[in-house]
Image: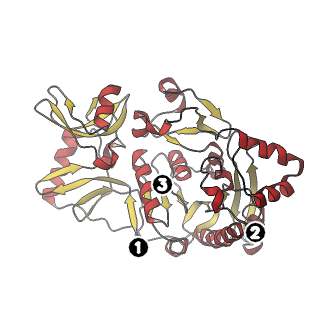
Amino acid sequence: MIELPESFKERMKLQLGERYYDFIASYDRPPCKAIRVNTLKINADDFARISPFALRQVAWESDGFYVDEEKAGKTVLHAAGAYYVQEPSAMCAAPLLDVREGERVLDLCSAPGGKGTQMAQKMRGKGIIVLNEINDRRAKILSSNVERLGITNAVVTCASPEEISREFAEYFDKVLVDAPCSGEGMFKKEPNAIPEWSEANVAACAIRQRGILDCAAKCLRSGGRLVYSTCTFSPEEDELQTADFLARHKEFTLITQKKLYPHEIEGEGHYAALFEKQGGETGEMRPIKRKSPPNKSAAEYALFERNALKTNFKNLHLNDSVLYSLPDDCPQISLHILRAGVRLGEFRGDRFEPAHALAMCLDADTAQCIAVDERTALAYLGGNTFGCGDETGWRVVTYLGFPLGWCKCVGGTAKNHLPKGLRI
């Protein structure tokens, strides 16, 4: 059993009473592992037929499954964005928002992206979802996960909650705040969190969460809904935080709240509360003024589309030499943006070179592809070339129908264009 802080155990004993002993016994079990199938690329039933490991359903997420595999994040299917590795109880918060296609959605504290990408799957590329992370390093990880899963309607920002609330006043239909917390539900998964725990840190987290929630409230339109969640058990950060929020924001009502303990479910524990806002306005923002590529560049991209794609991208926007396909109704944003819609590629002199992000949202129905077996897929992910017969030009490399990245076929050889930072 892992060594827990004595003051933490005393707090939990007072909090749980007789249930405390079952709670402590749960730390003798290994942490639960789970994946969430990426339904932007495949449905759960079809994934079950090709899954490299056994699956058991997570009760509160129809696309979530328990797995026993230690290296679930190291498979070809993971690299292809077929699924996301996510702690099972963390999957309980996003479904409370019931995100729909065409909505405006904000995940205010998004990295590494589990809950945000969970919501994006429900949107099916329609509407706009802003995924924000204040820490630049973590924001880059978030952006990478958005790219791998092939999400086309996301804007990834790196800003403070205060900056977000000023930029997006009363703009969103749905807001999720998975707040930074004392991490008591992470003790088994991340033992380094144990020595960082203290009652002082619990109190500090509660103060920070209070400010984040105030910012989130400002971002929500009248009639909009807000989910607040943590991966901790302390009442100061959970139920008492919810009560304090309601006392300060009379325009909100509590619809439901739930608390998952590790001795009661298969998971490490989570808290989530769902609120609805009444009163206020529905804010609007200026649409971004898109810059179309000049005629010569436009012709070069059109040639690439004809030769490599079976679909057309809309809302084209040129930023310096990089071409994007922006989400519908993408607003003008003055914050630090890491990703907006799909990065289609870059103009380099007289040629257009497609971006990895473009490949990851394509398949055999939307692009010219080369299907490879697992051995060749692993070689490709390692940065190697492979034979391509009489294929010529840009092609998306696919494994079991899932995209891995671009290659360029020249003289019978598929030259590898997988970004070096993504190579295994």
Q: Describe the element under mark 2 as helix, strand or loop.
A: helix
User: Which is more foreground, mark 3 or mark 2?
Assistant: 2
State how far apart marks 3 and 2 are (Cα).
29 Å
Q: Of the two numbered discs 3 and 1 on the same chain, state the one appearing first in sequence.
A: 3
Q: Residue at x 73, y 57 (%)?
A: 5
Answer with mark 1 or mark 2, whichever residue precedes in sequence: 2
The C terminus is located in which quarter?
top left
Q: Which residue is mark 1?
A: 334
Identity of the amino acid at label 2?
Answer: Leu
Q: Is residue 222 above or below residue 20?
A: below
Which SS class for mark 3? loop
Q: Nearer the viewer, mark 3 or mark 1?
A: 1
Residue placed under numbered mark 2 in the picture: 246
Estimate the spatial distance between the alpha carbons at disc 3 and disc 1, rounded to whole Å.
20 Å
Residue 144, percent from left and from top:
40, 52
- Name which residue lies at 59% across and 35% down: 65
Residue 262 tag number: none
Q: Nearer the viewer, residue 225 or 55?
A: 55
Q: Is residue 372 visible?
A: no
- Indicate left or right for 303 with 85 as reference: left
Q: Is residue 35 above or below residue 400?
A: below
Q: Is residue 310 left or right of residue 72?
A: left
Residue type at mark 3 is Gly
Q: Amino acid at mark 1?
A: Ser
Residue 235 in picture, x, y percent from top left: 77, 61
Task: Rate crowding at label 1 as few (under 14), some (14 to 19) or many (20 or more) other CA atoms within 10 Å.
Answer: few
Q: Height in image: 138 above or below 259?
A: below
What residue did someone put label 3 on? 127
Residue 339 position by quadrant? bottom left
